[in-house]
Image (cartoon, rainbow, N blue to C red):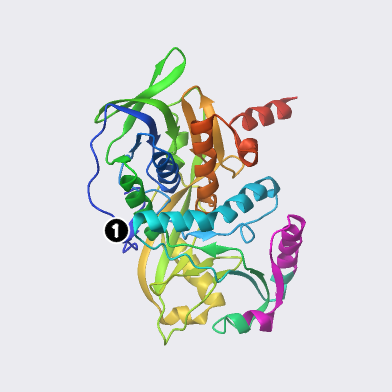
Amino acid sequence: MHAQTIGRRGGPGASPGGDRLPERADVAVIGAGLIGLSIAWRLAKAGLAVAVIERAKAGDGASLAATGMLAAAAEHEPGGEGLSPLGLASQRLWHPFRDELEAESGLTIDYRREGTLVIALGRDEVERLRFRHDLQRREHLNAEWLSGPAVRAREPGLRPTVTAGLFCPDDHQVDPARVMAALRQAFRAAGGRLIEETTVTALSREGGRVTGLETTSGALRAGTVVLASGAWAGEGSLVPDLALPVRPLKGQSMALQMTPRSGSLSHVVWTEQVHMAPKGDGALIVGATVEETGFDPHLTAGGLYALLEGARRALPGVEEMQVSGVWSGFRPTSDDDAPILGEALPGLVLAVGHHRNGYLLAPVTAEAVSTLILRGETLPVAAPFGLARFAARTSGESA
């Protein structure tokens, strides 16, 4: 595992073992996380021979460590204006994406549409919440201002110190463990091959074009290679000539168990310190710290204390909840916190750097990459997110 885990929540329907590495494929995808499997499933559905190569087990990176929020409005922050069209486009795609995924896998993903509350605790936080609301309105994001009593009417278990809130009705959520189990099932049902516990050691190139992979299980020739290896994409050993600006941003999270005595939440609730997401099995996911520690997976007392104190400050009932799991994971973060999509070299397509928006952006990423590979076309909404933007920014700064 790439994330240190104590009692992390698992998902249904994930069969053990993987497939054997084929000699050839139309498309080879490096990385069996949410992004890699979403792309691979779409391409396999279109009739291509697709192989996904994963260094560990499917979802072991950020995908199973995530909370599963589809939060185009709640996640919006200063400097994120350029990302809003992509997030909103993907949010609109989530309903058909869910319907197809559940139908083709035979599994449910606990898609919940109650919406998200962003709350202010005390007067000091109200002005910062108003600033956030102004940003949302300028980007035409759906967010309604609520008084403290109106927030508590929606979530009676919150403390009386809640003084205001934003209700984001379009910001839904899914269960990551269930999504990953469904993607694995749907991809293999579509004829895809999932090769786990196999490391890609090099890209094969001929005449300036990427033509396949070298792995610890042998060689694979492919018409196109998709790099979707999350936080590991920036390590540089596979494509040192690209210097991908992707790094790991560690997050620690925990699962609590809601009971009638402790009370519960119905909505995802954000504070300035934490977010809390109730799941269909009674779990309450509390996340997540933001730590620049490289690939250090260790859980820390300070990180877990910050999560518990942040949750308790808003929801006193957490004191009665059993801790059922704690874990860490690595967000794949680019230098501008936005994804990197598109062809980087002939035969090599990038789908990396989704930061903390992987679940929100999975459908539009899958559509953008599959459209590029199948039709040679770039979706207009994805066009601003190519690798070339970093070179252009560096040139502009130098000038």
Q: How many circles with numbers are drawn on the protein?
A: 1
Q: Magenta segment, which residues?
A: 127-152
Residue placed farthest to the front in the image? 47
Can you tell which quarter of the image residue 151 is in? bottom right
Q: Is residue 161 left or right of residue 66?
A: right
Tell me the SS state at disc 1. Answer: loop
Question: At 75% from the left edge and 68% from the top edge, which residue is drawn?
Answer: 127
Residue 274 visible from this viewpoint: yes
* Residue under pointer 1: 13
Q: Nearer the viewer, residue 23 or 154?
A: 23
Q: Is residue 96 left or right of residue 144?
A: left
Q: Is residue 243 left or right of residue 109?
A: right
Main secondary-structure element of the magenta-colored stretch: helix
- Which amino acid type corresponds to the residue marked 1 in the rendered image? Gly
Residue 245 visible from this viewpoint: no
In the picture, the quarter occupied by the C terminus is top right
Measured from the top left, where is residue 324 in percent x and y? 34, 70
Measured from the top left, where is residue 11 in percent x and y? 33, 60
Whether the magenta-drawn stretch holds residue 138 is answered as yes
